[in-house]
Image (tube, rainbow, N blue to C red):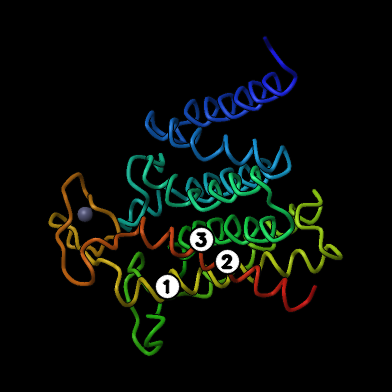
Amino acid sequence: MVTPGLLASLLDLAIVVAFALVAIGARAIDRRGFLASLAVGYPILLGGGLRWFVMVATFFVLGVAFTWYRYEYKKSIGSAQEKGGTRNWPNILANGGVASLLGLGELLGGGVTFAVLYLGAISAAASDTVATELGLLSRSPPRLITNLARTVSPGTSGGVSAMGMAGTLLASALIGGVAGALGVASVAGLGQVVAIGVAGGVAGSLADSLAGATFQRKSFCVVCGKPSENLEHCGEPTRFSSGLRLVDNHVVNVLATLVGALGSLGLYLLIR
Ligand SMILES: [Zn+2]
């Protein structure tokens, strides 16, 4: 028997599938990324409803837009995302995994704490993506977050730039603004929700850069010699140079979204 609840769940699934089909059609994700985005998107929509889904969709569109923005230039300096910027399943799970688990949490009970954590996780993922893509366009070389006197080449883990920081603020304020406008985590005024989003974005980006400068796996390209966060560059596997072997960019992304979630919760607890 088809109950209204089942019908609603099927409609939710149809929305997530439709969104992922558009993404795969635009080559924003690959085939396995399609499955990963269903795994991330469906619990979010089931647990948090359309408003939560609009937030993760905003992050996704923002990430795609900034990845494509001046892609040829970024490619020319050897720092563009591989494969035309098409995101693969590890990237999608790393950026959306924590948010997806929070969607499940919201489904099982949830409440404003989960909404605030969710806002922080999405804000951190968006901030990290936009900061990376804008940072690559920085005219002045990035500086190492643990030693600001030292400049590093664009794309180096742990490198920070004014452009990157602007990207963090822009993305997190936007995600906070969307959350406020939709009434997600409507703890007080719109300004406070934006501030809670920015807290998550800044905390997540800081965690990402600090991890990148310290224990994240570092490797370099055996073809062009450039540092790379990825396991592949110029079509060849990159060579390990330092850091913890298992802590690659994906692990750091999970960590950054967790710290982002806690950053937003921290500010929420302070100002509520
Ligand atoms: Zn290379």
21 w.r.t. 56: above or below: above
Q: Dot 1: few (<14), some (14–19), or many (≥20) neighbours within 10 Å?
A: many
Q: Amino acid at mark 2?
A: Thr
Residue 87, given in percent of the width and then of the height, sits at 41, 41
Measured in 3D between alpha carbons, the distance from the residue under mark 3 to the one under mark 2, in whole angstroms, is 13 Å
In the picture, the disc for residue 257 is 3
**Residue 141 visible in image:** no
Q: Secondary structure at mark 2?
A: helix
Question: Which residue type does callout 3 highlight?
Answer: Thr
**In this image, 141 relative to 224: left or right?**
right
Chain-order first, disc 3 or disc 2: 2
In the image, 62 versus 272, the foreground residue is 272
Q: Residue beneath label 1, please?
A: 209
Q: Write down the residue under mark 2.
A: 168
For ligand 1, give the image quadrant.
Answer: bottom left
Q: Quadrant of the C terminus?
A: bottom right
The amino acid sitting under disc 1 is Ser
Does 31 sit left or right of 112 as displayed?
A: left
